[in-house]
């Protein structure tokens, strides 16, 4: 195994085929680790010095990626983070080809141990509980004389989808089952819904979504007023649409848009990324919950296996059947370091029940 360090952002775009081929042949296969997502995030935020490590075998085949950057604080502390960390990205990891994880993690740990003069700490966020790196990287680091700490960062409620929508509704507890049926029945004669497709103007639909997103809460309005956040959406959404990964859906009441979800469909999973709502005009119809119910029904019809609410423990996620999975923070330091794990909470999903 040999490692090449890339410090120019071209690595995030110009090797898209090799990057994504490796990702899909790994246990870390998440939309947030695709070349498309990583390049859009970096172009929007570029928060430090890029430090992407690519692991290759002797034949030159890509075997692993550590998509990192170095963030230097005003006090001069140099922290290695994952591209995408932390707030607008939900799952991050170290990518290793299936069947070659152990030598890949060992090679990365050796590289880190040989370059401790370049950083003060490694702080990797948003690692899902299923991550092989989360299990193996601490041991590989400690074998090189490095210290490691793993801690729970946040939860991601998910729904494992059954074969039919009726089975899904029946799986909810009595109160939530009754409420969902009641809301769907009450709205049936007044609402319609659609998923944005090739027949729509994506720029117009994205503008409509962001207007609803800003209207739904002051927190979301402030988020979109930040030029970098808005730029990220404008870069990321067309890339996701181009690859067929975007699910932008609207619920209408007598033709007027009342609620919206910006989701992703990737690897047979629906990822609920953000939402918009006109709360005052149509609140009596619970448009957010109605649209969510229709999207779960649609996901089941399409044969998807997971409906993932992503980070955050908002009550509506559990009302809709979400079950917690964990995301973790992995910290690696050189011997003798007294640095403590950071508080890196944050969520990209809807901060309030729709």
Image (spheres, helix red, strand yellow):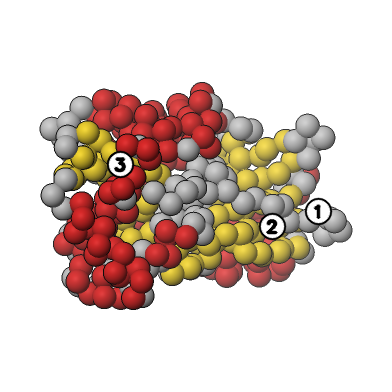
Q: Residue at x 66, y 64 (%)?
A: 151
Q: Left of 148 or right of it: where is 303?
A: left
Say whether disc 3 or disc 2 marks the residue closer to the N-terminus: 3
- Per the model, the C-alpha gap separating discs 2 and 1 is 9 Å
- Asked if the residue at tag 1 contacts the one at tag 2, i.e. Cβ–Cβ closer than 8 Å, the answer is yes
- Per the model, the C-alpha gap separating discs 3 and 2 is 46 Å
Given residues 325 and 97, the one toward you in this image is 325
Point out which mark residue 32 bears: none
Q: Can residue 105 be seen in this view?
A: no
Q: Where is residue 58 in the image (x, y as percent from the top left)?
A: 47, 55
Category of crowding for the residue at label 1, using alpha-carbon neighbours closer than 10 angstroms: few (below 14), some (14–19), many (at least 20): few
The quarter of the displayed image where residue 12 is located: top left
Say whether disc 2 or disc 1 marks the residue closer to the N-terminus: 2
Residue at the spot of label 1: 339
Q: Residue at x 61, y 40 (%)?
A: 69
Residue at the spot of label 2: 331
Q: Where is residue 120 in the image (x, y as percent from the top left)?
A: 77, 46
- Asked if the residue at tag 2 contacts the one at tag 3, i.e. Cβ–Cβ closer than 8 Å, the answer is no
Q: Left of 5 or right of it: where is 41?
A: left
Q: Can residue 81 be seen in this view?
A: yes
- Per the model, the C-alpha gap separating discs 1 and 3 is 50 Å
Residue at the spot of label 3: 282
Category of crowding for the residue at label 3, using alpha-carbon neighbours closer than 10 angstroms: few (below 14), some (14–19), many (at least 20): some
Q: Which of marks 3 and 2 is in front?
A: 3
Q: Where is residue 43 in the image (x, y as percent from the top left)?
A: 49, 29
Q: Which residue is drawn at 16% across and 62% down?
A: 301
Given residues 128 and 153, the one toward you in this image is 153
The quarter of the displayed image where residue 341 is located: bottom right
């Amino acid at each position: 195994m040999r490692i090449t360090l890339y410090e120019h952002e071209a690595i995030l775009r110009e090797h898209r085929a090799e990057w994504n081929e490796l990702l899909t042949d790994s246990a870390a296969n998440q939309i947030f680790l695709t070349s498309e997502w990583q390049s859009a995030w970096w172009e929007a935020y570029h928060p430090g010095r890029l430090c992407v490590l690519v692991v290759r075998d002797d034949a030159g085949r890509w075997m692993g990626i550590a998509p990192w950057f170095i963030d230097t604080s005003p006090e001069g502390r140099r922290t290695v983070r994952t591209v995408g960390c932390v707030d607008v990205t939900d799952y991050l990891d170290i990518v290793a080809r299936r069947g070659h994880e152990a030598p890949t993690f060992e090679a990365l740990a050796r590289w880190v141990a040989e370059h401790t003069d370049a950083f003060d700490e490694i702080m990797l966020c948003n690692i899902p509980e299923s991550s092989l790196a989360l299990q193996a990287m601490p041991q590989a680091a400690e074998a090189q004389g490095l210290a490691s700490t793993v801690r729970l960062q946040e939860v991601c409620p998910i729904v494992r989808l059954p074969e039919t929508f009726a089975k899904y509704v029946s799986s909810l507890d009595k109160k939530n089952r009754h409420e969902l049926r009641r809301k769907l029945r009450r709205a049936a004669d007044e609402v319609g819904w659609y998923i944005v497709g090739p027949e729509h103007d994506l720029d117009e639909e994205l503008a409509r979504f962001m207007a609803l997103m800003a209207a739904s809460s002051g927190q979301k309005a402030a988020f979109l007023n930040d030029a970098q956040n808005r730029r990220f959406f404008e870069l990321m959404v067309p890339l996701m649409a181009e690859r067929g990964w975007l699910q932008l859906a609207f619920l209408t009441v007598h033709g007027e848009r009342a609620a919206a979800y910006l989701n992703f469909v990737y690897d047979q999973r629906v990822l609920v990324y953000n939402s918009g709502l006109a709360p005052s005009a149509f609140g009596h119809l619970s448009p957010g919950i109605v649209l969510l119910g229709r999207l779960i029904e649609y996901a089941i019809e399409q044969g998807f296996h997971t409906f993932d609410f992503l980070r955050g423990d908002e009550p509506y996620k559990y009302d809709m059947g979400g079950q917690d999975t964990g995301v973790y923070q992995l910290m690696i330091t050189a011997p003798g370091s007294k640095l403590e794990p950071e508080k890196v909470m944050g969520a990209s999903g809807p901060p309030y029940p729709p």
